[in-house]
Image: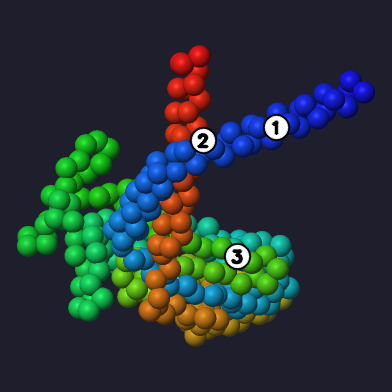
Amino acid sequence: MQDLSDKHTNDFDDEIDLLEFLYVLLEGKWIIVSLTAFASIVGVIYSLSLPNVYQSKAILVPEESSNSISGALGNYRGLAGLAGINIPSNGDLGNSAKAIKKISSLSFFENNILPNIYLPDLMAVKSWNPDTNIMSFDENLYDTSTNTWVRDFSFPKQQIPSAQESFRVFKTHLTISEDKKSGFIDLSIKHQSPYIAEQWAELVISEVNAFYRQKDKSESEKAVNYLNQKISITGLSEIKEALAQLLQEEIKKLTLIEANQSYVFDYIDPPVVMEQKSEPKRSLICILFALLGGALSVLLVLIRHYAFNEKTL
């Protein structure tokens, strides 16, 4: 019987505590309403101050040309090794796997991207005018009247943004991911200008294709020259015939390289100039500010009530 009465007492105490909690909140309703409204207004102002950002996205598929070339030359791998020529095995990483890492590297940005973009579009952009398609720049960073950098800087930064500093900013605009099941690659660029986002996305894809195309072309041309030299100095007809077959395959490889512009990646869906912004999510920002304001106001009312009660006691 004692346990049952204790249980009823605890339930009654819990009910009183809940009623007291609701009473405290009701008593401080104007504080809660005021702070929540203030936070909501701040959220609206903050969200409206954020510039629109557009995302241009491409869906890519790895080209199989380099894999088929390696497979065609696989039968001659042993002979090529004797001749001093390295032919990758089927287990080697293809150009597409290496290209994904290459795109995210500093060297690729410095040698292939940075020379082909307008640096203030990356490092000094302020806003984009959709009516005139004109970018405006932060005059504290870049003086458009003289086309010079005027920003304040301290070591390790420089007056003109370095390749490493620019690369860190560029990585925040670039997203690349691979679907392991399908093998498709998603590449996207974000920018305040949808036109620049589309141009940079196309630039990254074309440059990585050109990089590996030129790399394989150079290696194949060296192999052709080397094989021609070996054939000219080889006296054994069997060796010469085998080298001639290897030379024929290398010439085929070189022809495919010359003919294939989409050497590493081909488009499933090319990047386009987007009409709709991707961010900021202004409604979500306003809701989060309102929730945060409400939670802080409730906490303030509870602290104010119980702290005051403790002092009076």
Depth check, mark 3 against mark 2: the one in front is: 2
Place residue 276 in its image quadrant. Answer: bottom left
> Label 3, label 1: how many angstroms apart (C-alpha)?
54 Å
Q: State the CA–CA distance, disc 3 to disc 2.
A: 54 Å
- Residue under label 3: 178
Residue at left 43%, top 68%? 278
- Does 24 appear above or below 188? above
Please tell me which residue is depicted at 58% across the width and 76% down the height of the picture. Answer: 61
Q: In this view, does 263 lie to the left or right of 290?
A: right
Q: Mark 1 points at which residue?
A: 14
Of the numbered discs in the image, which one, if any, rests on residue 24? 2
Q: Where is residue 237 in the image (x, y as percent from the top left)?
A: 68, 77
Quick one: label 1 or label 2, which is nearer the N terminus?
A: 1
Left or right of 9, for residue 187? left
* Residue contact between numbered discs 3 and 1, judged by CB atoms under 8 Å: no
Foreground residue among 26 and 274: 26
The image quarter containing residue 136 is bottom left
